[in-house]
Image (cartoon, grey):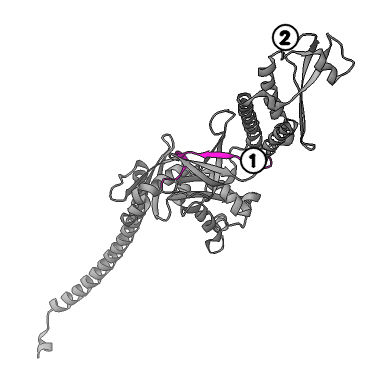
Amino acid sequence: MRQKTEDRRESLQQSIRQMMGHTDLPEDVFLSAIEDALRVIASRHYGPEAKVSINIQLDREVITCHVPKKVVNIMQDYSTEIPIEIAKNIKPDVEIGDTLEVEINPEEFGRIQAQLGRQILLGKLREAERELIYKEFEGREGEVVVGYLQRYTGQDAIIDLERTDVLRTEALLPGSQIPPPHRYNRGDSIRCLILEVKDTMTGEQLIVSRTHPDLITMLCEHEVPEVYEGQVRVMAVARDPGYRAKVAVSATEDGIDAVGTCVGVRGARVQTMVRELKNEKIDFLDWDEDPQVFITNALKPAKIRRVELNENAMSANVIVAEDQLSLAIGRRGQNARLAAKLTGWNIDIKSEAEAPVSLDTLFKEDDEIDENVDVESEDVDTSIDVEETILETEDDVSDSVDNDSTSEDTNVSETVDEPVSEDEEN
């Protein structure tokens, strides 16, 4: 009988050691959970008023439970009393009416109570794990964690996170946070952004995302040292998850090419991020304080003719050449949609033939016309003055010529009209 009891005790200790091997909880937390479970079982067996003391020494593989019992001559309640004959075997000098700490074997609680104790122990361990998970990840929203796909539950995915400082845990990747064209396989390594940390006893506590724009920002910090050190800043990100993203960057120091730094030599840095996002294309562009310049950069590779802003409505009319219209809009409007998200302006793209002439353009054209008219009028006045001078000169010359010709005619006439004498005729 004694050997059987020892076997049961060893089996209990082995079960506890196995349970400790399947969790990363600290030993003190685990021991506290065991004590709570055994105390609940003992209270069910000996009554809620029984003050059960439990001592666990895992290094010696000893688990002892003691319950206080009153020494009586005739026992009427097993849970709270002990006969004097049995009490003297434990303590020879005990007397009737004394209270004796009696050691009990946890295996004596019975199969049903043992199962109850196991469920209580698992519940306590699960509660302790959730509390430690919350403490470990509290305040870490926005960070990137690496995990492995464990399984799918409907459209949602369960991610087994890598070992942290405290424990290994699971995170929920909702179907709404998975890029539409992506489908992961069991065991795939996945980088996710911590979206939310919940302090709850039901469901998953960690909610992660693969579609959030900040995921690209964090990837830039991991892959581009200049971004991590603050020499290059990510100013804005717009994503069409799984297909394409636009990232506006700006250098905080002179002499640094922000776009070239993020792209890397032969595109090495951006290609690493593209592979992590399962071939989602990433376009880096220069950020600018001037909305017109920023919108122009955001709509690249299309060439923009002009940008007309309506600051009150936060809208922009973008005018492009006819052959650039489809390029500016993009496939299914993707380029224009991402540019609008990136800049925060409502963008309306039209060709030059479709675009109405704005008042600013009209005023500008009127000013240009007035300037041209003034210049032309000055030229006309000058030409008129020159012509008048030429005409006056020609009149003077004609007058002098007329006077000369008149004098000559007079002389001639006088000569012709003079009579000829007879002697001269002879």
Q: Residue at x 28, y 50 (%)?
A: 353
Residue 327 location in percent, x, y? 36, 54
Let me know if residue 235 appears in the view: no
Looking at the rendered image, the quarter that the N terminus falls into is top right
Q: Which residue is mark 1?
A: 22
Q: Which quarter of the picture shows residue 60?
A: top right
**In the image, residue 192 lies at what x, y percent?**
54, 44
Q: Are marks 1 and 2 in contact (CB under 8 Å)?
A: no
Q: Amino acid at mark 2?
A: Gln
Image disc number at residue 152: none
Per the rendered image, the range of residues in magenta is 164-180
Left/right of residue 7 with respect to residue 186 in the rendered view = right
**Residue 411 lies within the magenta run:** no
Residue 217 is at least partly visible in this image: yes
Vertically, is 202 above or below 380? Answer: above
Residue 326: image location, x then y, percent: 33, 53
- Residue found at the far bottom of this picture: 426
- Residue 175 falls inside the magenta stretch: yes
Quarter in which the C terminus is drawn: bottom left
Q: Residues within 10 Å of mark 1 (few under 14, many from 20)?
A: few
The label nearer to you, 1 versus 2, is 2
Q: Which residue is mark 2?
A: 76
Label 1 and label 2: CA atoms lie apart by: 44 Å
